[in-house]
Image (spheres, grey):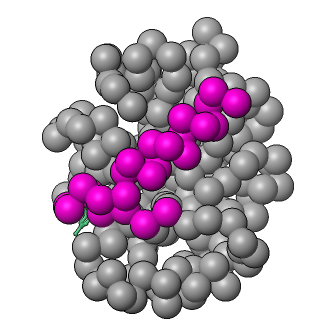
């Protein structure tokens, strides 16, 4: 994919702040710190476009990035960070539910999980939630540089099992090594141009 332009259009909390043009959206969701913002940067070949956090849980709003004036990447707030208060968790739930309810523009959600670990119960709940809302969801396994290539299949089968995937693909990526993003791009392109 040739990136001609990318710009942040909106950092939204409420529905009336979402872009209104009816442009297709591709969203990224996952635990805090899993690498959502880094993956968006890697896809766009930019360093500090989507903000990467030193402190987990930093992306607190829904960030809409307009790409080539054709579609949006949507960076959703992360979950599962221990040091978050109850009211913040409830706030996160509301922000997510508001966005996921009947969002016609949303054509695909990528659920990011860390390739090293079995997905958490939160990840499983997120996956089921997204399916419940009726969206297509593809799993991306991040930080693939942290294990050797020979171990990919073993780790991906753990992920597959926990999330209850059948033969759906999992896409391993590494923002550090910049690997896997060509495959992810192919998948994204198929999605929004369908
Ligand atoms: P929140 O916005 O808090 O939900 O986090 P996020 O999912 O956007 O994660 P972010 O991209 O901010 O990355 C979190 C940390 O993981 C940063 O310190 C990144 O440098 C690191 N990281 C992200 N991707 C990779 C990767 O592929 N490999 C390695 N080794 N580190 C990564
Ligand atoms: Mg982030």
What residue span does the magenta drawing correspond to?
A: 171-194
Q: How many marks?
A: 0
Where in the figure is residue 193, as x and y percent of width and height?
63, 27
Q: Residue at x 25, y 49 (%)?
A: 52
Q: Residue at x 52, y 22 (%)?
A: 71
Where in the figure is residue 134, as x and y percent of width and height?
82, 47
Queried whether the magenta region covers residue 193, the answer comes back as yes
Q: Quadrant of the C terminus?
A: top right
Nearer to me, 79 or 136: 136
Q: Quadrant of ligand 1?
A: bottom left
Nearer to me, 144 or 18: 144
Q: Is residue 41 left or right of residue 136?
A: left
Nearer to me, 101 or 145: 145
Above-or-below relation of 106 to 132: above
Above-or-below relation of 66 to 34: above
Above-or-below relation of 17 to 91: above
Where in the figure is residue 23, as x and y percent of width and height?
60, 17
Where in the figure is residue 31, as x and y percent of width and height?
47, 64
Residue 1 visible in the displayed image: yes
Residue 56 visible in the displayed image: no
Q: Quadrant of the N terminus?
A: top left
Queried whether the magenta region covers residue 163, the answer comes back as no
Q: Residue at x 72, y 54 (%)?
A: 130
């Amino acid at each position: 994919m040739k990136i001609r332009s990318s710009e942040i259009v909106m950092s939204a909390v409420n529905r009336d702040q979402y872009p209104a043009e009816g442009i297709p959206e591709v969203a990224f969701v996952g635990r805090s710190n899993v690498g959502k913002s880094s993956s968006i940067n890697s896809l766009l070949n930019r360093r500090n476009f989507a903000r990467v956090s030193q402190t987990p849980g930093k992306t607190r709003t829904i960030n809409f990035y307009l790409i080539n004036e054709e579609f949006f990447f949507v960076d959703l707030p992360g979950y599962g960070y221990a040091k978050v208060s109850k009211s913040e968790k409830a706030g996160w739930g509301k922000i997510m539910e508001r966005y996921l309810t009947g969002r016609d523009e949303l054509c695909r959600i990528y659920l990011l999980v860390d390739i090293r670990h079995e997905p958490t119960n939160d990840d499983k709940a997120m996956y089921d939630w997204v399916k419940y809302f009726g969206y297509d969801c593809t799993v991306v396994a991040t930080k693939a540089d942290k294990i050797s290539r020979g171990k990919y299949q073993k780790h991906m089968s753990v992920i597959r099992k926990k999330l209850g995937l059948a033969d759906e693909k999992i896409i391993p990526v590494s923002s550090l090594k910049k690997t896997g993003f060509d495959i992810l791009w192919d998948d994204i392109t198929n999605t929004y141009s369908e």
